[in-house]
Amino acid sequence: MVKSFLQYAIPSALAMCIASLNTVLDGVFLGKGVGDLALASVNIVMPLTILFFGLSTMVSVGGGALVSKNFGANNDDYAIKIFRQVIKFLLLASLCLSIICSLFAEKIVILMGATDSLIDLSAEYLRYYSMFCIPNLLGLSLASFLRNDNRPNLAMISTIIGTICNVYLNYLFIFKLGLGIKSAAIATGLGQMVTVLVQIPHFWGKKGKLSFGKAKIEIEIIKEIIKVGFPSFVAEVAFSIIILVHNLVLVRVVGEIGVSVYAIINYITTNIYLVLLGVTLGAQPLISYSFGAKEEDKILTYYKLANTTSLCIATVYFLTCLVFGREIISIFTSDITIMNMSYIALNLTNLAYFIIGINLTTTMYYQAIEIPKYSNLIGALRSILVLPIILILLAKLFSINGIWVSMAVSELITALIAYKFINIKKYTKSISYYA
């Protein structure tokens, strides 16, 4: 079981780590080539781009869990039908998002807290980013289904190739052509298009069980997918709300410099968040398959392995930032004030990631065994019920340092509540009633 877990978790985590480089490299190129205001502008838009990611993750994890469950129960035809429903739904949703965000970019960024000096840059970034909603969302979804179709290495390879393209195009557009903030959005979109082109032959050529084909949207299947996958959307919404609330509080307490610092922190911590998410996504097909086969012991083992792996990764990441934090931050900015503030902020914020991995794994776990109400509860606790109260309270008590440590406190409270009221072993023993 350990070997199976590593065969899925390592490529998934590595793929997410590489994918996160898209965001980090955007920050590096923008910070050096455009300026600190560009960093702050992208950070204003980031909650919305995370929501897009959440939509893709919702249907991918929901559909993937149902696909792997049906594979485990030897019901391959229904699994293929679910996959085709997801792809068609995602294409339609992506097209709608592209149109809405292109037409109303200025109004959207104002609602998200952009100040007068950030509105134009934020709206420009959003407008160009939204033009590529289809490849941005489809690339993430197809990677997830590749893992559920026993091709985790191909998912990783497609992500690597897309990231290499993104890096080259960022450099070309910003430093050679001087296209400004739109460069990051265009480069990311074109990189994702390459990723999708690498993924498509697997499904088009029917090299696994899943394949493209005609699909008429069936509301009941979409409801089933969303029901199981919705907690993943809630988890991403939680991360989006965390950023949005921090931005709003920082503007009031510190000003635009605080948003610039937080932008740098987000560029750096996006790596660890996506790696931890990659671990959970790697474990999901194994847990879902075991759920379909009603193998209780394997389900619990995979859950424990995911938590242990997440803690190890968080520890290495925390120590790395503690020792080399200033060097990492200097990649994004040369401003000494921002650099000093960012180093303190980074290490206080990083305390949260010891707990975030466990909360993400538990959220995914209940999706995989089709008890999503507990996943929804964890997501709501992380973002809506606990964080805003803790953030405002600690900001008043400890000013800016209270803001940086608030996420760690809220994640810990969420984990303790989940541990107290949601018994993993108890509900795993009930799988025969849900399968």
Image: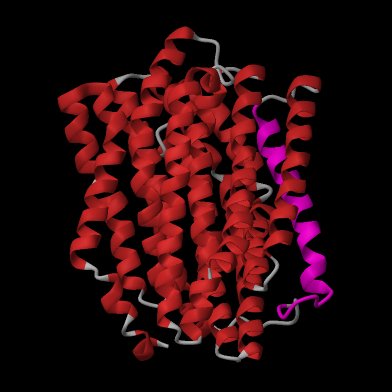
Outermost front residue: 2
Q: Position of residue 67 (x, y in %)?
A: 58, 79
Q: Is residue 161 above or below residue 146?
A: above
Q: Nearer the viewer, residue 305 or 367?
A: 305
Give the tally of numbered discs: 0
Q: Residue at x 29, y 57 (%)?
A: 380
Which quadrant of the structure image shows residue 126?
top right
Residue 214 falls in which quadrant of the image? bottom right
Q: Residue furthest top?
A: 336
Which residue is painted at 42% across and 88% down in the image?
A: 435
Asked if one can make out residue 217 in the rendered structure from this viewpoint, the answer is yes
**As displayed, is residue 202 above or below residue 115?**
below
Which residue appears at 70% of the width and 45% of the height? 189
Whether residue 231 is visible to the viewer of this picture, yes or no, is no
Mostly what secondary structure, the magenta segment?
helix
The boundaries of the magenta stretch are: 181-210
Q: Residue at x 17, y 27 (%)?
A: 396
Q: Is residue 63 magenta?
A: no
Residue 232 location (% of width, % of height): 44, 62
Q: Is residue 302 left or right of residue 179?
A: left
Which colour scheme appears in the figure?
secondary structure
Q: Relative to the observer, which residue lies in front, 350 or 211?
A: 350
378 sits to left or right of 86:
left
